[in-house]
Amino acid sequence: MSTYKLSHLKELEAESIHIIREVVAEFENPVMLYSIGKDSSVMVRLAEKAFYPGKVPFPLMHIDSKWKFKEMIEFRDRYARENHWDLIVESNMKGFQEGVGPFTHGSKVHTDLMKTQALLQALDKYKFDAAFGGARRDEEKSRAKERIYSFRDKFHQWDPKNQRPELWNIYNARIHKGESIRVFPLSNWTELDIWQYIRMENIPIVPLYFAKERPIVEIDGNLIMPDDDRLPAQYRDKIRMRKVRFRTLGCWPLTGAVESEADTIEKIVEEMMTTTKSERTTRVIDFDQDASMEQKKREGYF
Amino acid sequence: MEKLNIKEFLDQDEKKDLLRLLTAGSVDDGKSTLIGRLLFDSKKLYEDQLDALERDTKRYGNAGDHIDYALLLDGLKAEREQGITIDVAYRYFSTNKRKFIIADTPGHEQYTRNMITGGSTANLAIILVDARSGVITQTRRHTYLVSLLGIKHVVLAVNKMDLVDYAQSVFDHIVKEYRHFAESLGIPDITCIPLSALQGDNVVTSSENMKWYTGKPLLEHLETVHIGSDKNFTDLRYPIQYVLRPDLHFRGFSSTVASGIIRQGDEVIALPSMKRSRVKSIVTYDGELELAFPPQAVTVTLEDEIDLSRGEMLVHPDNLPLISRHFEAMLVWMDEKRMDSEEAFFIKQTTNLTRVKIDKIRYKINVNTLEQSATEALELNEIGRVIFTTGKPLFFDPYAKNKNTGAFILIDPITNNTCAVGMIIDKVEMKDMQEFEIPEISLSKLGISPEHFEAIEQVVRELDRQGISIKLNQ
């Protein structure tokens, strides 16, 4: 009997594929939110596996806040082209034209307008009834209790007090018109699982994850890599070259780097296991207010 | 401990398996402290496997003596203070032998619903008791729910042994009483461990204070308990999840193997059409497979062009599931809204969705005393034995024999909430029970010409997929 045994990674893979197929079978218009990060890269590979030898039957959508690292955008476009992805890119153009950004408006306003509102506008525009996201339960407290199928009302709001019971691998896909669900196929993966899977499957990821000499300016204790000329003048002469890598990727003014020598996946894992900081602490955004993630999630952010 | 370099560590780590566990017990039993210690101490051990690890010494304090392990799990506490009811939180930890997912369910209230939600996928349940109070009503309730969910492995963690002077007699007494009760519920594997979560006795390392205990400490037990034969590898059940037709040349049936083994070349029979074919190939992104087993998610192609859609099932011809519109099940009511026994609910079982009516509630069960009593309707957290009739035949097995084909959820047709969950006991003969009226359409009688039949059939199939059954006659 012991031959009929899956490794933990293969079992997680099978669980995720089951979820992705289930959504496609039961929803009319699903989309996969693609953040260009490592978790998204794993999620995309799982979608490819779920429908092989067919093409993935839903589009990928990237919400571009217009403040992403240039390397992320290059990676996104190349990857979509090479793999024939149906890629949608959406931004809050009104916010962009009005010059909304973290330096001028603060991280809270920026995140709300350029990420949350941009996402909600895009979901309404295409009338998606299910949106896959790459969030994991081990990332953050409020995610530890979230369902795999996370129900959202007409205003895309999450109600943590009123979640549907979710048992076995039987998912309740019934919604009323205008309502939607967010689906988290990676719920049970940990950060280590993600790295191991990337290693096992040779999944390409944005080079920013690997340590390299990069121009860095320290802002409020965070190591920020200025990626374009929108860095405020007072910081410009404080830029120094430092060997850093990014543990998460997002808007460049809101994503702190960590000093690191880890330039391979193996070294990243080794570093991860010897460091105390949890993954999201390098995101400046989380320090804005108390219980900020739960608040953002209720408002519709992932 | 064997030290490894990072490459060896990862190569070895990739191959370990996964154990899902449920913890039951209240904060007073020291549950948070126990989970905190498991998470924390195992992490230290796990990382110590790595060679040349430069450890931040501040991180672990002085030998762990002054750490409040319960504080590490501040999530649930914080939520209670905020007044947010949460039913289950998931926590993750690893050792070099296994990865673990803990479903942690808080509190006393709503316990049935919480435990059922957290435990549905668990391989093992840890039931905590306080050595000073022994087996109490709550212990019996937890154990009953564990047996209802078909969890095959139970660890009775007799905690706070330090407060009873590590006395063997106390432990033996509790174990005797517990086994007597739990074995009557048919739980096949019960392991009892005396421990002190606070002091660390028998959690990760063997206790110096209880040399009389010769079994494994908790973590070692969790790492080595054999779960491989818990799955059903005997009865092939392949419920079609998605029909994959990327082009004219490929027609595959994608699904997760619910039970049994499906092999290339196997003769299979499609339910409900009873058409036969052979498995031509088992396709995956990583290459074709000779065979697939649960819970692998694969795509099967067949030798013959037979019609097969979502909700239907492939099985071996000599091993059919039960096929019926009538069955009885243990039902757990999960909704604040009381059961309306006149309602036509949606039922989802494997990949099938249809309507269902409640014919009769045989009894409800008191989870504290296991006494049965009559009732007209179930309320939140109540469990009853219920007879159902579905809108179309389902393919199922008793839950005790096959979790994946014996489990179902009920969905309220108005709120769309998952209002109940059930575990099938068996089919029932229903000659004298009320029949579900399935509307019938006779196409020729309606004067519809044959060229439209296909389009109408397609619509009817789609309606059927949505749970609305119509019988079509040409």
Image (cartoon, coloured by chain):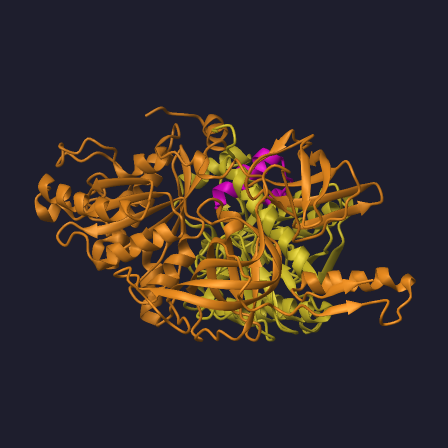
Chain colours: A yellow, B orange
Q: Nearer the viewer, residue B321 or A30?
A: B321
Q: Is residue B375 above or below residue A62?
A: below
Q: Quadrant of residue A131?
A: bottom right
Main SS, magenta residues: helix
**How far across and down, in percent of the image, does residue B261 sit?**
58, 35
Q: Is residue B324 magenta?
A: no
Q: Is residue A76 left or right of residue B203?
A: right
Taking the spot 86% from the left edge, 62% from the top edge, the residue there is B453
Q: Quadrant of residue B365?
A: bottom left
Residue B86 appears in the figure = no
* Residue span colored magenta: A190-208
Query: From this viewpoint, which residue is outermost toward the top?
Result: B2
Q: How many marks?
A: 0
**How far across and down, in percent of the image, does residue B74 sit?**
32, 59
**How far across and down, in percent of the image, does residue B318 sit?**
61, 36
Q: Is residue A302 above or below residue B1?
A: below
Taking the spot 88% from the left edge, 64% from the top edge, the residue there is B452
Q: Quadrant of residue A178?
A: bottom right
**How far across and down, in percent of the image, does residue B95 sit?**
38, 36
* Quarter containing the N terminus of chain B: top left
Q: Is residue B393 above or below residue A74?
A: below
Q: Is residue A301 left or right of residue B401?
A: right
Residue A57 appears in the figure = yes
* Quarter containing the C terminus of chain B: bottom right
